[in-house]
């Protein structure tokens, strides 16, 4: 996944902003910002809250969602107003649902909640909105500006529909068509900052299995080398070859064998 900066900002009156993936917001007069280098990096929590109990409660909730080791505490205490039970309502909104939102932010300004960003599907968008509404009392107004987008795996799969990464017969040398397919895929892979991709080679069942397994591994490695040559991080690309062991179709027909000879790309969980 891409970078997921998280920022907390409180100004005159209680105001909490959590940025979800994207550049760290600039500091404004009376406000503060914080960010994370990436979705597995540090989450910096800063700003001011009305009292120490509120501070500790918010920090505990953020640590529960993102992991204690990732949270950097820069959250302060100052005289500022907040609605009744504001801290408890904030904690109800800082849930693991936020990990499904990218390129946006959660802003809680008094009794007004704004959620902006992208989700992987309409179902995820509706689930997040429903959970937020159920967690708050009627005095809160929710402005849901989420939009449904494609998950990284779906974006990869859509590029590959009806296409194959082609090699010269019996070898691990990419054909011009094979390179063309990879060239179409590279821009999508470049958006997956920090995510690991599993490249798996498959063959049909023609010939000896040990040779097919070796060939499938060599082809997966050839794909990796091509991606790395096009400035994708080598450490983020894993390779495997399973030969004929995971067929998609019947190896008794030429059409089936053609479907079984393939390269698969999977975003690792």
Image (cartoon, rainbow, N blue to C red):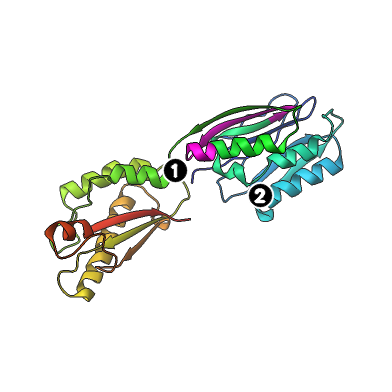
| Residue shown at the point (64%, 50%) measured from the top left | 66
Q: How far apart are the alpha carbons under marks 2 and 1?
A: 21 Å
Q: Residues within 10 Å of mark 2 (few under 14, many from 20)?
A: some
Say left or right for 58 vs 53.
left
Looking at the rendered structure, which numbered label has been put on residue 65? 2
- Whether residue 209 is in magenta: the answer is no
- Disc 2 + disc 1, Cβ < 8 Å: no
Is residue 245 at all visible to an observer of this figure? yes
Question: Which residue corresponds to the image point at 66% horizontal and 36% vertical from the top-left?
Answer: 132
Picture residue at 49% right of the left edge, 36% below the top: 122
Q: Nearer the viewer, residue 14 or 232?
A: 14
Residue 211 vs 86, above or below: the answer is below
Residue 83 picture quarter: top right
Q: Judging from the image, what secondary structure is the residue with disc 1 in?
A: loop
Crowd rating for badge 1 (residues with CA inside 10 Å; few <14, some 14–19, many 20+): some
The residue indicated by pointer 1 is: 151
Question: Would residue 169 appear left or right of 63 to someone viewing this image?
Answer: left
Left or right of 42 in this view: 250: left
Residue stretch rendered in magenta on the structure? 108-125
Which of disc 1 and disc 2 is earlier in sequence? 2
Q: Secondary structure at mark 2?
A: helix
């Amino acid at each position: 996944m891409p970078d997921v900066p998280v920022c907390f900002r409180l100004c005159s009156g209680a105001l909490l902003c959590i940025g979800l993936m994207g550049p760290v917001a600039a500091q404004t007069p009376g406000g503060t910002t914080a960010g994370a280098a990436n979705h597995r990096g540090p989450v910096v929590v800063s700003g001011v809250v009305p009292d120490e109990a509120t501070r500790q409660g918010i920090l505990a909730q953020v640590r529960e969602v993102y992991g204690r080791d990732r949270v950097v505490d820069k959250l302060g205490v100052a005289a500022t107003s907040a609605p009744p039970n504001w801290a408890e309502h904030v904690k109800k909104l800082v849930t693991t649902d936020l990990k499904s939102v990218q390129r946006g932010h959660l802003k809680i300004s008094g009794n007004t909640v704004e959620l902006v960003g992208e989700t992987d599907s309409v179902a995820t968008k509706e689930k997040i909105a429903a959970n937020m509404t159920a967690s708050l009392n009627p005095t809160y107004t929710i402005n849901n500006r989420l939009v449904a987008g494609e998950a990284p795996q779906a974006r990869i799969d859509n590029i590959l529909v009806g296409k194959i990464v082609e090699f010269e017969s019996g070898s691990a040398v990419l054909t011009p068509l094979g390179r063309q397919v990879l060239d179409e895929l590279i821009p999508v892979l470049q958006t997956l900052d920090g995510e690991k991709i599993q490249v798996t080679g498959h063959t049909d069942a023609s010939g000896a299995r040990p040779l097919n397994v070796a060939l499938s591994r060599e082809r997966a490695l050839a794909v990796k080398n091509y991606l790395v040559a096009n400035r994708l991080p080598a450490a983020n690309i894993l390779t495997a070859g399973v030969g004929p062991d995971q067929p998609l179709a019947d190896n008794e027909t030429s059409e089936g064998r053609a479907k079984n000879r393939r390269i698969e790309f999977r975003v690792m969980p």
